[in-house]
Image (cartoon, rainbow, N blue to C red):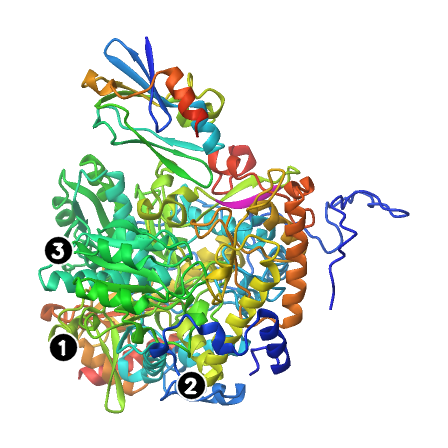
Amino acid sequence: MRYLPLTDTDRSEMLAKVGASSIDDLFVDVPEEARLSGPIHGLPLHASEMAVEKHMRRLSKKNLAAADAPFFLGAGAYRHHVPASVDHIIQRGEFLTAYTPYQPEIAQGTLQMLFEFQTQVARLYGCAVANASMYDGSTACWEAVAMASRIARGKRSKVVLSGALHPHYAEVVKTMAKFTKDEIADAKPVMQGSPDNEGLIARIDDNTSCVVVQYPDILGRIPDLAEIAEAAHDKGALLIAVNTEPVALGAIKSPGELGADIVVGEGQSIGVGLQFGGPYLGLFAVRDPKHVRQMPGRLCGETVDAEGKRGFVLTLSTREQHIRREKATSNICTNSGLCALAFSVHMTLLGEKGLRQLAAENHRLACLAADRLASVPGVSVLNDGFFNEFTVMLDRNAREVVRELADRRVLAGVSLGRLYPQADDLAGGLLVAVTETTTEEDIETLGTMLREVLS
Amino acid sequence: MNTPNKSGWKPEVNAPEDGMHAGPETVTGNRALMLDEPLIFELADNMATGVDLPEPASNAPSRLGGMERADAFGLPGLSEPEAVRHYTRLSRQNYAIDLGLFPLGSCTMKHNPRLNEKVARMPGFADCHPLAPVHTVQGALGVIHELGEWLCKLTGMPAVAMSPKAGAHGELCGILAIRAALEARGDARKVVLCPESAHGTNPATAAFAGYEVEDIPATGEGRVDFDALKARLGPDVAAVMITNPNTCGLFERDFRKIADAVHEAGGFVYCDGANFNAIVGRVRPGDLGVDAMHINLHKTFSTPHGGGGPGSGPVVFSEALAPFAPLPFVEQRGDSFHLVEEETAKADHEQSFGRMTAFHGQMGMFTRALAYMLSHGADGLKQVADDAVLNANYVLRGLDDLLHAPYASSGPCMHEALFGDDGFEGGLSTLDLAKSLIDEGYHPMTMYFPLVVHGAMLVEPTETESKASLDQFVAAFRNAAERAKAGDESMMQSPYYAPRRRLDETQAARKPVLAWQEPDET
Amino acid sequence: MARYFTDEHEWIDVEGDTATVGITDYAQEQLGDIVFVELPEVGAVIDKGGDAAVVESVKAASDVYAPIGGEVMEANAALEDDPALVNTSPEEDGWFFKMTIGDKSEFEGLMDGKAYKSFVDGL
C-alpha cells in the first residue's frame, strides 16, 4: 500500500521488539465479540491512484460546474477569480501539513500569517480586533449571538434577527437557541426597495441583548447600519453586523465605522472558491477591544522571544475549551486556518487598490445586469440600492424558472423559493449575483433566456 | 540512517568551535537560508496590487444607496513575485509533516496524500455552488452519499450527519441530537458525564448544550471505572461522553458493559471518535453500543490540518438517534440523490433538531477523505490501524524503561503512548523536553494532556512513519529524557536552533497586540 | 483590623463593615505570572463560596470564591492595567475587591495568619 512505509520484515522485527506474537496480540483489550475477522463486508478493496482518480473524475463530471455555464448564483457563496498563486501557496507542505501553532518557535509561518490575516480582517470590517477565523459565516453568526449574551451577563434574553438575514444563518441561530436560554425574534423579509429599518428598530426593547443585521442583506439591499446601531445602543443592545460578501466592503462603508459592535461574516469570496459549500471561512471581529476576552476562537498576538526578536503566539487561551473546559467561551477548537491563508494571500495580492477595483467591476456589471433584466417583460428589479447582487421579481414561480434555465445550461440565480420554501408570496423572487467572472455576453444570454421562459 | 550524536551534544550553537567562527553579523539579519520576513504592512503600501483589474470609469453608475466607502482603510498590496516570496519565506518558518515526524498524541498527524488534493480541485467539486439546482450537482451529492455509506459501514452505524464542520462541531451535533431525543420523550435530564482525561471540547460542548458536567472516575490502569460510573448513573444522566480508544492510548475494555448500563439507566452513549484511526477496519463502534460518534476526517482519513483547520466532523448515529439528526442531508431515491432541507424535512424528518451550518458540510474534505478511503479500501484501512498501533507500541517499548509510563502495564497501547515527567531533575519539565526535541528536528509530542498524568507526554507516531524514522525518533527522545533525568540545565533555554527562541507568552497575554498598527499610531 | 485566610488561599481584611479580599502570596506563586484578573461588578451580591473573580495565568484560569457573603463595593481598577500587581504585591496593592459584610458569623471557620501558615506548611 503506497501510503504505508512498513515492510513485512519491519513488522515482524517490531512485533518481536514489543513482545507480541502477532498484531492481534495488540488488540487483546477489544472484547472478542467486537473483533472483526476480515475486511469489512460490502466495501471495496484497495485501489491504485489511477483507479481512484478515474472514479472521482466520473463523479465530478456529473456536476455542472460554474465555469461551464453563464452563472448568477450567490446568496452567501460567490464565485470570484482566485489568482493561481493563491492555490500554489496553500499547497506548500509547510502550510498544508502543519498543525495548530501550539509550538510557536517552529510555527512562526502560520502565526505571522494569522497576525496579518487578523489585521486585514479588522481593517476590512472597520474593527479593532479580529480572531484567527471560525468555521464559516453562519456559525460565526451564532457565536456572535452567544457572545452578546455573555456580555449581557444573562440579564437580557432577546435576540432580534433582521428579516433580511440569510435564512440559513437564522436557522442556525434558532437551532442553537433551542438549547440555550435565548429567545429569538425572527421575521420574514419585507419585499420593498429598501430595508425595513423602521420595523426592525421597533422590535428592539430593554430585554434585547443584540440585533443581527445582514449587510448587504439577503436581498442585496444595503441597510444604513448607523441608524440601527444608534437605536440598539439607546436600548443598551449590541449591533451584530453580518456580511456574506467581503468584496462589497471595497465599495461600501465598513460595519465598524457605522457603529456595529460585533462584525461577523463569510470570507469565502476572497481566495477560497465555491467548493459546494465548504470548507469556508468564518470571519469574526469586534469594534471595541474591551470585548476581546469574550470572543470565541483562537487569537494570535505579537510578543518577543528570549533574544528579544519579534515573534507571534496564540494568546488569551484561557477563553478556550482546552483550558477552560465547561467554562469556555465556545467549544470551538479547529479554525479554518488554510482558508484563512487563502484569504490572506488573495487579499495581499489585491491590496486596497485591487479590492476597490474588484468591487467597482462587480458593481458595474451588476448595474448592467439589473438594467438588462429590467427590460425583460415580466421581470422587475426590487432593489433601490445593491452591490453585486439584487432581487428580481418574476411573473412566474422563480424556482421552476431556475430549473428550466439550468436545463438550458444557464445557472440563473438562487430563487427565494429555495431559501423560503414555505413563503408563497416570495415565490416569484430571484436573487441574481454578478461578479467579475460574469461576462457581458453571459448577462445578455440570461436576459434572452429569461424572456423565452417567461413568455 | 542518521543517528544522533550521543556524546557530542553542544547546546551553545553560537559559540565558536575549534577552528571555526560563528560568523559575522549580517547586514540583513538573515543567515543564508534562515530568512526573516517583515509583515506585509511593513513591506507594501495601499497603492500597489498584484492583480490586473480595470480602473473604474469616473462616470460609472453607482447604486450603492449613498453608502460609498470614502476613506482609505489600509490594506497593503503586493505584486505576485513579492507575494509569492513573502509567503514562501513564511512557510519556511513552519514545521510540517512533510518535513518530519509530528508525534502529536490524539491529533494524528499522518501523511496527507497528494492525490486527495488533486481530486478536491476537480471543477465538478471545487467550482460548484451549494445552492445550484439539485439535478445539476448529482455527482457532488453522490460524493456525500458515498462517503456517508463508507462511514456507516466502517462504524457499523445506520445513519450519518455530514454537515458538522469539525470535531467539536460534531460533538455538538451528537449532544444536541441526544438532547432532542430526550426532550421528545419528555425526559429533562441535566447531567453529562465525562472522564477527566477527556479532551476539553467534551465538557465545553456539553456545557454549551446546557448540561452540567460531572467527572467520571478512572481506574489506576487508565480506564473508566465501570463500577463507579454505574453507581453514578440514574434518571438525571442524559449521556456519557467517552473517547475510545481513550486519551491515555488505551482501549476501553468495558465499553460494551458501560453502554449497556447507560442504556438501562435511560441515557445515551456519546463516543468521541478522535482516535478512531486506531481501530478503523478492526472494530466497529456500532458493535459496542455507541449512540453517536463524530469522526475527524483530518485525523483518521488524512485530510490536511492546514495549520489549524479546516476540519470536518461527520457524526454517525444509532437507530435511536437517527431521526433527530440535523438538516440538511442527502438521500438516495432510485438513481438520483435528493437534498433534504427544511422544506421536505417537515414531511419525512420532522424530528430533526434543525440546521447547524449554512450549507452541506465540508465538501472539500469529503472528496479528499473519499479518495483516501478508496485508495486504502477495506483491507488497507485495517492495515492502517494495525500499523498505527504497532508503531505506537514500538515507541512505548522503546522508551518505557527510561521514562515513566504510567499505563505501560495496562496492556498494549493503541495508537499513542503516554509518559509522565516523574524523575526529571533540576526543575526540568515536560516543556523543556519538548523544546529540546525541536532542536533535534522534531515537532514535540502533545504536552500536559491528558490532565490525569503529571507532565503528560502523549506520543502518536501514526502509521505513515517507517521503522527507520521511529528508530531515530526514539534515539533522540531517549537522549532528551536522559538529559532531563540528569537535570541538564541547558534544556531550559531550548530550542536553540529554531527560527525563534522561547516566546514570551506572559507579555503577549498581559498587553495583547492582536493587530498591526502603524508605528506612529502607537 | 483583622486578617483572615481561607483554605482556598484568599485573605480577607476586615475594617468596620468592610472586607477587602485578595489572594495570598502562596497562591500567586502557585499560579505563576498573572496576566488577567476578571473582577466582579460593583453592586453584585455574592454568597459565601460563590464565584467572585477569575485569575488567569497564560495556561490556567482559576476561580476565586467569595470567602463570605455580601455586596461588592469596589473592584481594584489598578489590576486592569497591571495584573502583575498580584505577583508583586499580592497581599497589599494586588487586592481584588471590597465588599460589605453580610453575616459576621461567616468568619467562623476561617483561619488567622498563624493557622494559615501552618496550613500552607502542611501542603
The residue nearer to you, when weighing C10 against A204, is C10
Instruction: Specify the segment rendered in magenta.
Output: A310-314
**In the rendered image, which residue does mark 3 sit on?**
B188
Q: Could you tell me if the residues under marks 2 and 1 are in contact, i.e. CB atoms within 8 Å?
A: no
Amino acid type, residue under disc 3 in the picture: Ala
Whole-angstrom CA distance, mark 2 to mark 3, is 41 Å
Whole-angstrom CA distance, mark 2 to mark 1, is 34 Å
**In the rendered image, which residue does mark 2 sit on?**
A39
Amino acid type, residue under disc 1 in the picture: Asp
Question: In which chain is the residue bearing label 1?
Answer: B
**In the rendered image, which residue does mark 1 sit on?**
B348
Q: Quadrant of the N terminus of chain B?
A: bottom right
Would residue B212 appear left or right of A60 to someone viewing this image?
Answer: left
Asked if A435 appears above or below A285 in the picture, the reply is below
Instruction: Specify whether residue A81 is in view.
Output: yes
- Is residue A204 a member of the stretch shown in magenta? no
- Is residue A313 a member of the stretch shown in magenta? yes
Would residue B81 appear left or right of A437 to someone viewing this image?
Answer: right
Asked if A358 appears above or below A408 in the picture, the reply is above
Task: Tell me the mark number nearer the camera, choosing from 2 and 3.
Answer: 2
Task: Tell me the mark number nearer the camera, choosing from 2 and 1.
Answer: 2
Residue B315 lies in quadrant: bottom left
Q: Name the spot of residue B183 as percent of width and height, x first.
A: 12, 60
- Secondary structure type for disc 1: helix
